[in-house]
Amino acid sequence: MNKRERIVKEAIDLFSSKGYEKTTITDIIRNSDVSRGGFYHHFQSKNEILDDIADIYLEDFSSVFDRVKSGENCNHAELILAVFKSIVDFKIRQIPEWSILQKLFAFKGNHEIVMKIAHSFEQFVTKVVTQVIESGNAAGEFDVKYPAPLAGLMTREFMILLRAVQKVHQESGSKLSNGLTDHIGFFCTFISRELGLEQIEAQLENAFETYLMKMNKESSHDYSI
C-alpha cells in the first residue's frame, strides 16, 4: 500500500468513526503516519479525498461496463439493455458488503461523501450510455440527434427507479407497487421509442424484482447508493 492509498484508507476509517465534518486533516495525518508535507503532496484538502473514495467505489463498476461493452455478437440495442441490467447486477453484488459501506454513510455529516459518489456514479453511467448511442449512430442502428442529453435523461430516470425500488425495501415491501411497475413501463417505452428498440419492459422489471428480493433476503440495511 503506497502513501496515497494509506491516507485514503485512514480517512475512510475516520469518516466511518467520527464523520466527515468532525474529521480534521490533522487526524488523517496522524492516523496515516505521514508528514503534513506528505499529505499535501497528494491532497490539497479533505474534500479532494472524496474523489479517491468515489474512484474506489466505481472501480469494480467500471470493470463491469468494460465487459459489457466488449461483448461479442451484441448489437447496440442489446448493449443498451445490457448496460442498464449490469447496473442492477452490480447493486445486487454489492449487497453483502453493505454493512461496511453503511458505517461510512451512517453519519449525518457524511452527506458530502454520498453526494460525491452518487454524482460520480451518474456521470460515469451517462458517459458509457452516450458512447453506446454514438457508436450505434455510427453503425446505422440508431438515429439519435442528441446522444449526450438523451443518455443523461435515461440515466437519471433509471437512477430514480433504482431509488424507488430501494424505498420499497426500506418500507418492508415484498413486491413492486403498481405505480412503480407503471413507471418502469414508461421508462422502457420511452427508451424503446427513442432508440428504435423492441419492448424491453419485462426484462428490466424482472431485474428490479430480483434486486428487491435480494435486498429483502440478505439484510435490512438502507441501500441508498
Image (cartoon, helix red, strand yellow):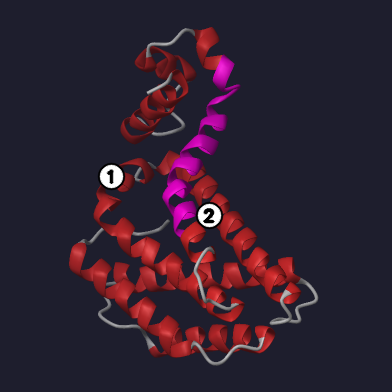
Q: Looking at the rendering, in which quadrant would you find the N terminus?
A: top left
Q: Which residue is drawn at 27% across and 51% down?
A: 97
Q: Position of residue 41 (x, y in %)?
A: 58, 15
Task: Name the amino acid, label 2.
Answer: Phe
Q: Residue at x 52, y 49 (%)?
A: 115
The magenta stretch spans residue 58:
yes
Can you name the residue that lies furthest to the front here?
A: 73
Task: Name the amino acid, label 1.
Answer: Ile
Q: Depth check: 139 or 43 in front?
A: 139
The answer to whether residue 128 is seen in the rendering is yes
First in sequence: mark 2 or mark 1?
1
Q: Position of residue 185 (x, y in %)?
A: 50, 89
Q: Position of residue 219 (x, y in %)?
A: 21, 61
Describe residue 11's horizontal placement relative to residue 149 as left or right: left
Residue 88 in the image: above or below residue 224: below
Q: Depth check: 191 or 131 in front?
A: 131
Q: Depth check: 113 or 79 in front?
A: 79
The answer to whether residue 222 is seen in the rendering is no
Q: Quadrant of the rendered structure where residue 122 is?
A: bottom right
Q: Which mark is residue 121?
A: 2
State the extent of the magenta-drawn residues as a range. 41-64
